[in-house]
Amino acid sequence: MSSVASVGTVQAALLSLWPGFTVETLPGIDSTNTELMRRARAGSTAPVLLVTPRQTAGRGRLGRQWQSQPGASLTFSLGVPLAPPDWSGLSLAVGVSVAESLHPRVRLKWPNDLWLGDARGERKLGGILIETASLGALHYAVIGVGLNITPREARGLSTPPGWLQELLPDIDALQALTRVAVPLVETMLAFQALGFAPFQARFNARDVLQGREVSVADGHGGVLSGSARGVTGAGALLVHTAAGMKQITSSEVSVRPLQRRADPSA
């Protein structure tokens, strides 16, 4: 199937779910998230999936860079008018949808990363960036997703990279898009109706932090340590500390799993 036919198939499926949905591809752009936020603030708030093989100023959470090159990664943003009962847990629901669409071995790290883990260690496969805009009575959400498709250098990265071809050797970016796009829009509709609660158990089943010692930094010099115990029905991370169970909800925190101790019997 050609790329044009594949994109057309995705658009037809999305139109059946959400009237007026369009799929747009660009050869390159600074950031798909930035572009959709620009359009929304200029009055263009129709549902759209914007895909590009090359981002020159892609952004991750907490201002981190996420650049992409043709063939090496999949980068896209979904822009939709959204009015859920509670916005809490949206990035977690997106992670659940993308992970389940890709492979059983894709894991989730609170609040917005997709990870791989095996005997070679833990590696970051991709990330999610959620941005919202209030435009009068309308609320518009832009959901950005970046996935490594082919091998990527680890230089300059705090977490070693993983890539989808480790799990699916023949997959390319377009094939990855056709796997994740429709389920992701279905997830947005479910989240709008019910919030995060229906995704809680599904997130916990893939939670890479579950039962592990973690260090939580709030970005202002404060650090909290404890054992991660999954997430609540509102998407908060539960951390059992010396002072009791804490719920971590701030979007400004950084959570890192502490290194696993080597098994002395190995």
Image: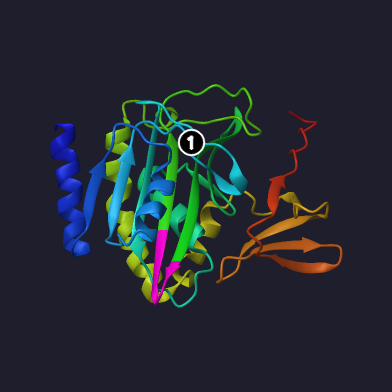
Instruction: Tell me if I can see residue 121 in this picture.
Output: yes
Which secondary structure, mark 1?
loop
* Camera-nearest residue between 13 and 213: 13
> Which residue shows up at 50% across the image and 69% down it?
87
Left or right, residue 230 beside residue 55: right
Left or right, residue 40 beside residue 22: right
Coloring applied to the structure = rainbow
> Which residue shows up at 23% across the image and 48% down it?
23
* Camera-nearest residue between 104 and 196: 196
Q: Which residues are magenta?
A: 134-141
The quarter holding residue 13 reads bottom left
Q: Position of residue 175 (x, y in %)?
A: 27, 36
* Camera-nearest residue between 28 and 89: 28
**Residue sticking out furthest to the front:** 42
Within-10-Å neighbours for mark 1: few <14, some 14–19, many 20+ = some
Quarter of the image with the C terminus is: top right
Quarter of the image with the N terminus is: top left
Q: Position of residue 164 (x, y in %)?
A: 42, 33
Q: Position of residue 180 (x, y in %)?
A: 33, 47
Q: Is residue 9 above or below residue 165?
A: below
The quarter holding residue 148 reads top left
- Label the magenta part by its dominant secondary structure: strand
| Amino acid type, label 1 | Ala
For residue 136: magenta?
yes
Instruction: State the residue position of label 1.
Output: 57
Instruction: Tell me if I can see residue 202 in this picture.
Output: no
**Residue sticking out furthest to the right:** 242
Q: Position of residue 51 (x, y in %)?
A: 31, 41
For residue 216: magenta?
no
Left or right, residue 85 beside residue 188: right
